[in-house]
Amino acid sequence: MSAPRPLLALLLGFAMCWPLAVHALTLEQVRAMASGETDARIEALNQAVSTADDKTAAFIDALANDAVKIAGDKVWIIKDGQARDPLTGAASALPDDAQDAVVNNRMRGEIDSAQAALKLFAKDDAVRAAAVDAMLKESDAAKLPLIEKAYQAEAVAAIKLQLGLVRAAVLLSSTDKARRLEAAQLLAGSGNPSTKTALLERLKTETDAEVKAALAASLRQVEASLAWGDRLAAVFSGFSLGSILLLVALGLAITYGLMGVINMAHGELMMIGAYATYVVQGLFQKWLPGYFDWYLVAAVPCAFAASALMGAALERGVIRFLYGRPLETLLATWGISLMLQQLVRSVFGAQNVGVENPRWMSGGVQLMANLQLPWNRIIIIGFALAVLLGMAWLIGRTRLGLFVRGVTQNRPIAACMGVNTARIDTYAFALGSGIAGLAGCALSQIGNVGPDLGQGYIVDSFMVVVLGGVGQLAGTVYAAIGLGVLNKFLEGLTGAVLAKIAVLVLIIVFIQKRPQGLFAIKGRSAEA
């Protein structure tokens, strides 16, 4: 839990929202909370919270900040370097024998819970909503009076509904059968995992048959609601994985799909893009800390350029001598991949390095209680779509794209038309490598960056290209998204390892039935 903050906003909220007469903090409560046995202190804390006023909130805040001193039966809070009376706020002299009020871990946990409960009366709707969510995860019967008061005072319908669920979760432990039945009926409409846990725990100890049946019925409804959240989460995770596979496979769609080069170093080109992002992050941290949240904008072109230049050097230095010799190309690029991994280990070390998300990529969109869509995943999906559209435009609408298509379809005729085929090979390979660098930049935002980063995606990306149809961008898109969603659904049923095996078997069966993939290149057959 984050460090406690001053409760000025909370106290203002008390003044505006408290519906009933409050009871002033007493000296006996102050003494009981500040010292003594832990159980007695916790009991005094809960009693004070249930009838809290602004002085109670200030004293609990002081306890949380280790700003309470005791000497005999006297208690002070330290504020702005001055000892003050917790009841009147008047400054007073602190005796030399005054000691800190000891707050052990158990007491600190109860104080944190009390502070969260007091935030139910904050003026800010977001603060109250967060406090309700926290209490829903850890309902406490001792805070029922405070919850009842907050429920009566709450004016925002959505927060009041959640408060009602908190109240119902507390009522599950009531000795009154009618109240337990009421709680079971109220909780049936909740789609919160904490509600499921509370119902399961109560079912273990419930003895009344009628209440037990009501609890079981509520549990079934809650599980049905959570199941929808799990299904939607699997679909989103599948699209997220598919977008990453798409970014990785787009580069292969050029180097392998259009040029016919089996590049086993494609994963290492992706790794170079990720490390380029890491380097840009370090430069911003050192030289432009005030603009750190925008380092990723600068890292995208840097990642593309670093991988594209490495790809161009690879094509000019090795690949151009091996066109038409797939086995030699495979072995050569595999050896280069090992060299690039060792180079990165020598420069950056063998350990993974961390790349931070900018603040605008942190957090997520909460759609359901058990379904949150992280912003970094959402942005990566959008980024993959933008790269796809840019690549489709480049290949289909530009002069470079025309030359690339001409060279890959009929190299001799393209050369006869005056196209510098060697230069186009270099440009095309650099483009595919640069897109791999963009994939590495995106991957750096959802995991650590290490020398083995590309190894986990190279096989899957080849499967995407082959399944979609060699040389077909549309097939690459459908194959990437389809494999991502299928893999996530199978993981929920069989586990990660068996899901990978099942996907591979399905691809093999599909290729046996349709060797050309999802989308075949249209044209006249030579045998027709």
Image (spheres, grey):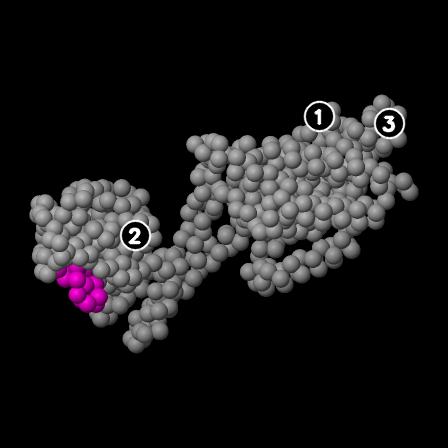
N-terminal of the two: label 3 or label 1? Answer: 1
Query: In the displayed image of the protein, which residue is found farthest to the front?
Result: 96
What amino acid is at disc 2?
Val
Tell me, yes or no, if residue 278 can be seen here: yes
Indicate the position of residue 511 as horizontal and vertical percent values.
76, 53
Q: Say above or below: 244 vs 68.
A: above
Q: Are marks 2 and 3 in contact (CB under 8 Å)?
A: no
Tell me what residue is drawn at x 31 percent, y 44 percent.
126
Which residue reaches farthest top?
418
User: Which residue is rendered at x = 59% and y = 64% of the image?
Assistant: 494
User: Horizontal placement of 253 versus 217: left or right?
Assistant: right
Mark 2, residue position: 132
State whether residue 46 is above or below residue 359: below
Q: CA distance from mark 3 to mark 1?
A: 18 Å
Q: Which residue is mark 1?
A: 398
| Amino acid carrying mark 1 in the image | Thr
- The structure residue drawn at horizontal position 21% and vertical position 54%, both measured from the top left corner, is 63
Quadrant (top left/top right/bottom left/bottom right) for the C terminus: top right
